[in-house]
Image: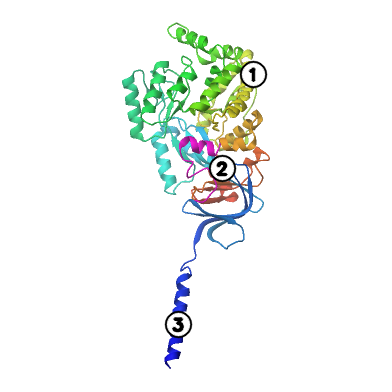
Amino acid sequence: MKLSRFFFSLSVALFLVGCARRPTKLQIYDVVINHVTIVDVLTGQLVPNQVVAIAKGKIVEIQVADKDSYAAKQYVNGNGRYLIPGLWDMHVHFRGGDSLAAANKKSLTLYLVHGITTVRDAGGDLTTSVFQWRREMDAGRLAGPHIFTSGPKIDGPGAYWPGSLEVETPAQIRKALDSLQRLKVDYVKIYDSKISGAAYLETIRQAQRRGLKTTGHMPYSVTLGEAVKRGLDATEHLYYVFKACSGKEDSITTAVRNSLTSSKPLGLFAVLPAVYDTYSPTAASQIFTLMAKRHTAAVPTLYIQRTLAELPENDHAQDSLLTYIDPKIQATYQRRQSGARQQSLTTQVFNRKLSTKFMSLVPQMQAAGVSLLAGSDSGPFNSFIYPGASLHSELEMLVLAGLTPLQALQTATVNGARFMGTAEHTAAIAPGKDADLVLLTANPLENIGNVRKIDAVISRGKAYPAAALANMMRAVRNR
């Protein structure tokens, strides 16, 4: 009898131990993507037949498909598809004042639908709205990309863009930077419509001492080398890099400085033909080497340069994406269109030549080790540069300029994350990384245009399949 009770007790104990070893609750992931090919944007390797499990906005597991079963709130079929990190547009604008706030907000949808899960707002006058959108998106009440913002631009007295912080003296620069830090902006954007060379360099110096990133346009009254040595973190567009490629940069800079006190000060566009005619491969090599050494990035924005150069001859009235641009924002396109219609034939020919020349700089910078960041410059006042799709066009132009598809992808993923200091947790596909991803129906390493073939977008750990993306587009379509 005692022996029977012993075996019974042993059986119960073993049963209880077995139960303790089993999970009491099956883990249910938020999203599971199965049988997908992962594109490693660091190495260019393809990793086929993987399962990616996502929970609480993070990638938590990656394994060979069929190794285990997974329970999920959302299943995404990755069979025959390619998974890349979400794209970054490193130069966009939210602006136009409060009357255009709602119209700007619609562009958040356009970015996300086109696989752009992060944008960098390069200065505007809707900072309060931008921060409100960020709070709504973080809370899950609004779908859209992560936003890094500079807040208001820093410029000189009588600045061109409304809302700019106007500075001239070191004290005014300190006050402007104080206000930006109170706003908790992500970096400092400097503009060149009125700022003096001295104030420009002083702004970089003071911002660097505070640990703030600086980027922007640059007055032609200073050299890019001076700005890079002060600590400029990035230069927007290629007008300023191009000037540094002139064998006569110093004399051109002196001529600009001397003209500022005259009745006819020399502006950027007046000087560009002289820069073009004095281009020097040696000077180009020197500035690219300096930029790489000092870690100054460049945002080429090739697509807007070409689009605006061709504006006098192209009719965009039938553009398929125009119907998704709010009429109030379409109205802001008129300014550039009017200017284009007034251009002389000589100016039109030169602008097209300049676009070609700018493209030739891109592979040289890449070879020299300069970090390139993909940016569209989309937003109000920039005619027919549509949020979302224009970044795809930018990537295509970077490849046309001479980058490989992998290098182009890097400009819109890992390079942006490194620049903003978030590479540890984003812009890659690995456990622990943010679940901001794009599922493509074709391999982008074979043809960069395949970034347009989007089957699903995962943003903040939530999956938006093709049908959902189509519904989002319909919601912002002009009635």
* Distance Cα–Cα, label 3 vs label 2: 58 Å
Of mark 2 and mark 1, the one earlier in the sequence is: 2
Q: Quadrant of the N terminus?
A: bottom left
Q: Amino acid at mark 3?
A: Leu
Please provide the residue range marked out in magenta.
Answer: 412-431
Residue picked out by circle 1: 353
Disc marking residue 115: 2
**429 part of magenta stretch:** yes
| Residue 100 picture location, percent across and down | 45, 33
Could you tell me what secondary structure mostly forms the magenta stretch?
A: loop
- Residue 199 or 469: which is nearer the viewer? 199
Q: Which is in the foreground here, disc 3 or disc 1?
A: 3
* Distance Cα–Cα, label 2 vs label 1: 32 Å
| Residue 184 picture location, percent across and down | 36, 36
Above/below status of 139 relative to 174: below
Of mark 3 and mark 2, the one earlier in the sequence is: 3
Q: Quadrant of the C terminus?
A: top right
Above/below status of 292 relative to 387: above
Of mark 3 and mark 1, the one earlier in the sequence is: 3
Above/below status of 343 relative to 471: above
| Residue 75 picture location, percent across and down | 57, 57
- Residue 317 or 124: which is nearer the viewer? 124
